[in-house]
Image: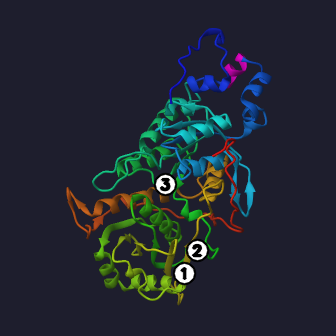
């Protein structure tokens, strides 16, 4: 979007409104803005959004939002950030946000007209660089938390199907500011850490080196469940599958993260992953036939949804991620239709498998569409400076996804039956201590976005 070529110099002789000054060169601190005009003048110029300057509001964590793209209502930025600004649905009721979005950076800025309109309507400055957004135009870290939502946009896909989203590129610039400022704040990273394992491991390691809470991942593990139950910690889980949408890298990550949120609660805790294999197309169902434990669990899901035996196999092709854990536990993620995302686990001592489904998105595209629990836990992370779940899970789910994407390829050659990859890199051990974190109670009504302008 073309900007006015206005010189902003001594005395502010052009006397632009504050929001235009910030759009042109958003590097003014609160003190500088209050020096340009009295507090009353600032209030009059930027309206009710100026409450971010009130003494009471200053105790609320200030959040920098760093997005790849924000152009339509299906953008993850639109799903997540509007809830951080205007509140979300939690425990059966509207919950006001307890953080203030203090700055926004959008990598594909010119294409993100919706994000620009939201920022202007809410009085939130848009910055031209990541560093400016997290320093609020200053020299050092000036926010209390960072939210990275780099899930959509016009980005290339490589030969193996990796969507080259700039998650690491954004994150590493945040780290530079942390290191320069000699302090850090909590970071949320939407979906997996990176399409590249080395980048993902670096991102996790930096969170430990600089001692900040790191969270992120899929919104599905904290979505509404049927039944509303959580598997107890130290449950003797033997084998597990997850059935759901797995059509691409983003889809398979959702399903893998759902799997991990359950299997990490098994007896002895998470032991890490020994090997991963990807099997795609018609060969995938042959693998199910050879592995009776997986076929049995698959049939139990079909039965629970009143589908006939072999319902899932009616789809001529699917894709499967086979996971072998260091402690001997077996698992698979299988592409399947008609069951949302469904986990099923074989538990020692129980005659019937445990089945838990995540079904039916809230909608249409409005204030409560899709995840509300995820913004809730983002807010909790920013307030408590503690991870809502082990960040090791985020790293492990990322790694499983990365190696799954590599399995079908050897150099430039593709095979539907992928290589079984030994994964010593995923020797990641931890024990979950968290309680239930998923959405409960009444599902949200449709409520228009609180945008401040007509859609």
Q: Is residue 261 left or right of residue 410?
A: right
Do the numbered discs 2 and 3 sit on residues whose CB atoms are within 8 Å?
Answer: no
- At 55% from the left and 21% from the top, the residue drawn is 4
Quick one: label 1 or label 2, which is nearer the N terminus?
Answer: 2
Q: Is residue 140 visible?
A: yes
Residue 376 position in % (x across, y down)? 65, 54
Do the numbered discs 1 and 2 sit on residues whose CB atoms are within 8 Å?
Answer: yes
Give the extent of the magenta segment: 30-36
Element at badge 1?
strand
Q: Nearer the viewer, residue 328 or 357?
A: 357
Tag 1 residue = 354
Q: Given this view, does label 1 or label 2 mark the residue nearer the observer? A: 1
Residue 252 sits in quarter:
bottom left
Residue 124 position in % (x across, y down)? 64, 34
Tag 2 residue = 231
In whole angstroms, how far apart are the C-alphas of marks 2 and 3? 23 Å
> What count of labels does the image hold?
3
Tag 3 residue = 191
Q: Given this view, does label 1 or label 3 mark the residue nearer the observer? A: 3
- At 39% from the left and 64% from the top, the residue drawn is 247
Residue 108 position in % (x across, y down)? 46, 38
Element at badge 2?
loop
In whole angstroms, how far apart are the C-alphas of marks 1 and 3? 26 Å
Q: Nearer the viewer, residue 376 or 76?
A: 76
């Amino acid at each position: 979007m073309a900007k006015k070529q206005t010189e902003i110099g001594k005395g502010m002789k052009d006397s632009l409104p504050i929001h235009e000054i910030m759009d042109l060169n958003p590097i003014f601190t609160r003190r500088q803005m209050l020096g340009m005009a009295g507090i009353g003048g600032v209030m009059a110029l930027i309206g009710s959004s100026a409450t971010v300057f009130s003494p009471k509001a200053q105790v609320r964590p200030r959040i920098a939002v760093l997005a790849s793209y924000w152009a339509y209502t299906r953008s993850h930025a639109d799903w997540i950030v509007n809830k951080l600004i205007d509140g979300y649905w939690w425990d059966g009721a509207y919950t006001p946000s307890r953080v203030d979005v203090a700055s926004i950076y959008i990598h594909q800025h010119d294409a993100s007209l919706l994000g620009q309109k939201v920022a202007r309507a809410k009085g939130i400055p848009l910055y031209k660089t990541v560093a400016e957004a997290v320093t609020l135009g200053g020299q050092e870290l000036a926010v209390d938390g960072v939210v990275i939502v780099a899930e959509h946009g016009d980005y290339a896909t490589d030969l193996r199907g990796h969507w080259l989203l700039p998650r690491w590129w954004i994150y590493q610039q945040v780290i530079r500011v942390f290191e320069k400022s000699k302090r850090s704040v909590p970071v949320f990273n939407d979906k997996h850490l990176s399409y590249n394992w080395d980048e993902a491991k670096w991102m996790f390691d930096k969170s430990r080196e600089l001692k900040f809470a790191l969270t992120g991942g899929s919104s599905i593990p904290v979505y509404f469940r049927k039944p509303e139950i959580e598997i107890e910690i130290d449950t003797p889980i033997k084998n597990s599958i997850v059935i759901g949408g797995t059509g691409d890298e983003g889809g398979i990550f959702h399903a893998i993260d759902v799997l991990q949120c359950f299997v990490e609660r098994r007896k002895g805790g998470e032991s890490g992953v020994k090997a991963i294999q990807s099997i795609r197309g018609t060969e995938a169902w042959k693998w199910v036939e050879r592995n009776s434990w997986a076929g049995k669990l698959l049939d139990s899901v079909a039965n629970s949804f009143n589908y006939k035996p072999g319902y899932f196999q009616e789809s001529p092709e699917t894709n499967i991620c086979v996971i072998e854990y260091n402690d001997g536990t077996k698992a698979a993620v299988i592409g399947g239709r008609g069951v949302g995302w469904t986990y099923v686990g074989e538990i020692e001592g129980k005659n019937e498998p445990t089945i838990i489904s995540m079904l039916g998105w809230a909608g249409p595209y409005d204030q409560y569409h899709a995840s509300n629990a995820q913004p809730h836990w983002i807010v909790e992370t920013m307030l408590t400076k503690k991870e809502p779940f082990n960040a090791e899970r985020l790293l492990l789910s990322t790694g499983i996804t990365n190696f799954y994407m590599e399995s079908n390829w050897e150099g430039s050659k593709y095979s539907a039956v992928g290589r079984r990859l030994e994964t010593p890199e995923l020797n990641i051990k931890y024990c979950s201590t968290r309680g239930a974190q998923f959405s409960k109670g009444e599902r949200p009504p449709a409520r228009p976005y609180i945008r401040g302008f007509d859609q």
